[in-house]
């Protein structure tokens, strides 16, 4: 593939064939999710948070929770892809297949009333990390997730542990 990078004052565009790609990750900023996907840990992401992993993806308990939706899971590709504009269709499909498995696991283990699956692109789309990731959240009747979106907090590894253990046990006995 041939890429042409065009820089403007506000953002960098990567032109690939006829597709316009929008990228915002600063060149000197290391990707925390790439480090995690390659076996490392960060201040927020620990290996013990991983609930599912295959050759292309990792699913783990998020270190940041909303007030009524504890234990939500993030699914990432192991390959660095910044956003939905960059990702190959096959990998995007696989990520959503894994997100579906996670949603079913949440229903079975958390006994939640429903689930939400979200993915954000670019700063205006509320993307905060420059590595594509999909949020799979447990939902409960009247949880007001979208009304209380700003009420989120980082949680400790100890708080995440029971959620990770439930999901790991589910996936250990329900590999499909």
Image: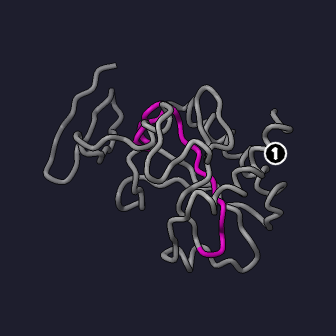
Q: Nearer the viewer, residue 88 or 155?
A: 155
User: Residue at coordinates 54% horizontally, 32% vertically from top-left?
Assistant: 89
Residue 114 in the magenta stretch? The answer is no
Image coloring type: one colour
Question: Looking at the picture, does residue 152 appear above or below residue 38?
Answer: below
Mark 1 lies on residue: 170
Q: Nearer the viewer, residue 88 or 51?
A: 51
Give left or right: position of 150 versus 52.
Answer: left
User: Residue at coordinates 53% horizontally, 62% vertically from top-left?
Assistant: 64
Give left or right: position of 111 versus 160.
Answer: right
User: Residue at coordinates 55% horizontally, 79% vertically from top-left?
Assistant: 148
Q: Residue 137 appears at what percent x and percent y?
A: 65, 60
Question: Looking at the picture, does residue 146 appear above or below residue 3?
Answer: below
- Classify residue 52 by image quadrant: top right
Q: Residue 38 appears at what percent x and percent y?
A: 48, 31
**Circle 1: element type:** helix
Q: Nearer the viewer, residue 35 or 125?
A: 35
Query: Quadrant where the N terminus lies?
Result: top left
Question: Which portion, as a residue range, is magenta?
Answer: 67-87
Question: Looking at the picture, does residue 78 appear above or below residue 29?
Answer: above
User: Residue at coordinates 51% horizontally, 70% vertically from top-left?
Assistant: 153
Q: How many marks?
A: 1
Question: Looking at the picture, does residue 115 appear above or below residue 37?
Answer: below
- Classify residue 76 by image quadrant: top right
**How many residues crowd mark 1 within 10 Å: few (<14), some (14–19), many (20+)?**
some
């Amino acid at each position: 593939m041939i890429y042409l990078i065009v820089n403007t004052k506000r953002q960098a565009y990567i032109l690939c064939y006829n597709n316009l790609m929008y990228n915002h990750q600063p060149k000197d900023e290391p990707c925390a999710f790439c480090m995690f996907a390659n076996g490392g840990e960060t201040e927020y992401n620990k290996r013990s948070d991983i609930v599912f992993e295959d050759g292309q993806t990792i699913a783990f308990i998020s270190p940041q929770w909303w007030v009524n939706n504890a234990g939500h899971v993030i699914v990432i590709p192991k390959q660095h892809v910044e956003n939905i504009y960059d990702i190959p269709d096959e990998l995007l499909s696989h990520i959503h297949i894994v997100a579906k498995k996670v949603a079913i696991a949440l229903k079975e283990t958390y006994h939640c009333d429903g689930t939400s699956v979200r993915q954000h692109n670019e700063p205006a789309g509320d993307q905060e990390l420059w590595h594509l990731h999909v949020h799979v959240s447990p939902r409960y009747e009247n949880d007001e997730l979208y009304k209380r979106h700003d009420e989120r907090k980082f949680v400790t590894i100890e708080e995440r542990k029971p959620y990770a253990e439930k999901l790991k046990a589910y996936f250990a006995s329900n590999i499909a």
